[in-house]
Amino acid sequence: MATVDERTEAAQAAGAPFRPSTGGWAGRGVVYAVVAFFVLGFPMLREPFEAALFSRAAIYAIIALSLNVLIGYTGQISLGHQAFVGLGAFTSAYMVTVQEQPFGIAIAVAMLVGALQAGVLGLISLRVRGLYFALVTLSYGLLAESSLFKINALTGGGAGQPAAKPAGFTSDHRFYYLCLLFLAAVLWVDWRMMKTKGGRALLALRENPRVAATFGVDVRLYTLFAFAVAGVFAGLGGALFAHNDGHIASVTFNFQLALLFIIMTVVGGLRSRTGCVVGGGFFALLGWLLERVHLEGPLEHFPFRPLSVEVFELVIGPILLLATLTLFPGGIGQQLRPITKWLGGHRFDVHDRGEKDVQITDVRA
Amino acid sequence: MSVLETIGCSIRFGGVQAAQDVSIAIGDWEIVGIIGPNGAGKTTTFNMITGFYTPNEGRVLFKGRDVTRLGVHERTAIGMGRTFQNVGMVKAATVLENLKTAQHLWAEYAAVAGMVGIPKTFVTEAALTERSDQILELLGLSDLAEERVADLPYGDLKRCELAVVLATDPDVLLLDEPTSGMGPEESEELGDQLLKLREEFGLSIAMIEHHVPMVVRVCDYVYCLSFGQMLAEGEPLEVRNHPEVVTAYMGEDPDEEAS
């Protein structure tokens, strides 16, 4: 809060105090209202199965924020996030269905398990870095698929494990708002983390562990801390994933899902909360959006009609990833920056893309 | 009594003896210079003092305590501060953010408390910002507070780095080439500043420095290293005129130097 004041002061000192006019605020208000309508009101008007898709969007946003902690803040890549999310999902489903615990406890246990398994990987990351650490996470994901997810008591075997929605949120529409609430909580925690010592320590660590250590940061502790935070977010995302689907089977959590998670985080934008939310939401809804365009929209007579939506879904992700890696390392978040700045009461500046916030090297580990 | 001391520290990397039996002592309120040609083991000595390297032999004493096996961050916590040859700051962050990061141990709340948003953390954060501003003002760097480190010219970087290391609240300052990238006038200014800071913060300072006039003017005592070994030590002028030191810097045969 003090920093914002200071920035204002600095701006005033520079002789350029910018305050949006009444009309300017009205314009921003309209944008806020439109966004609020699409986030809060629009899903209400759609079918229940579509509300579940919007819940999925909120859940993917949480998962993207989880990966962002690792890739964006600490510079460690996780190619095994399907295991993080999957274990959270099965833990919560198991707690509710087999142990008959209330939803709150199930979610808490899922987050704890997420933190623990991520902590184990964190211990490894202290020894192995870069490409080889990515390989470790990759094999961890595959290992979890073929071992943890094969424990019948936990996952219900091939048939899967039922995961009932909590009392009061049994409809898809109501559960969507619960997911939004959790997403808001994750966004708050992420925001506060980056404004306080934990986040600053992580950014210092990512850039230069030696410098971080001379600042008094315990390198080991904060590496584990980053993994634990990512694990908690992933566990939460997984638990909501399970209850949103109502039934969860191990085939869901395959390597392809881990790839999708990475793509949506990087395309969304590292170190950008807005980017992660938009990226997660976009990829969760991509299939649905394509169908809408395909079935109802202007592409009804598109000559490639015989190609199914899934094909496009598979192609669009990698294309966007390539575009991000080569052209816009900051992803969607960077492209949206002029707008988000403007919404925050600053001048609209198309050229303010914060290019230096995310460098190409960040995404080319 | 010396506040910081290395006793016979040696370290070897494979076949290279990077430091051999290095014993230096920094007294209370003293400014000690460490000079020597490139590759003499000066930075290696700093790395042993601050904990990046553990010496194969010898001990490091800090405030009468054996810290030879203490971690880097633990030494920061008990009052060791250091700068780096190639600038020890977070380049993606602003100068102000760097000062706040450097006050990691001063932020007396758990990282998790900060994430949840406990009211106390807001108060502490404001206090950290205020303290950062004070330090920047003291060093005349307030204008640079909002500048991103990556955008600053090298000379400014070295001055900001000094502010950042002061934010860790050290008792002993280890400066690795503080004047590199600075012109003669700037170096002189920095020398004055160090003398002033010593008064204000009650600092003891050890610095690796190539700029000999600065060393002569500022330092109370000088050590000269060459090929990992102590070549000479004593009063600045004494060391500067020491025949072996002159040889080490100039080379024995001018013709060989030329090739």
Image (cartoon, grey):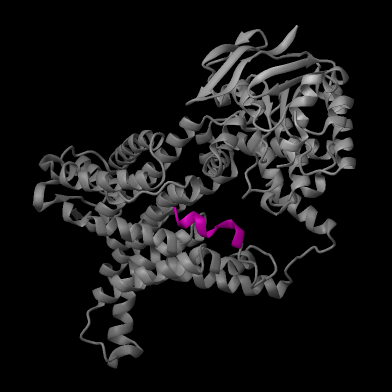
Magenta-colored segment: predominant secondary structure: helix
B199 to A194, vertically: above or below: above
A324 to A133, vertically: above or below: below
Spot occupied by residue B95 in the image (x, y as percentages of width and height): 71, 45
Side (left or right) of A225 relative to A287? right
Q: Nearer the viewer, residue B234 or B96?
A: B234
Spot occupied by residue A259 in the image (x, y as percentages of width and height): 31, 58
**Whether residue B207 can be seen here:** no
Spot occupied by residue A347 in the image (x, y as percentages of width and height): 70, 69
Instruction: Name the quadrant containing residue B259.
Output: top right
Residue that appears at 28% across and 79% down? A291
A185 to B3, vertically: above or below: below
Side (left or right) of A331 relative to B131? left
Spot occupied by residue A338 in the image (x, y as percentages of width and height): 61, 68
Q: Which of A193 and B182 is in front in this view?
A: B182
Side (left or right) of A269 relative to B214? left
Q: Nearer the viewer, residue A300 or B3?
A: B3
Q: Nearer the viewer, residue B31 or A93?
A: B31
- The stretch of residues the image draws in magenta is A355-365
**Whether residue B123 can be seen here:** yes
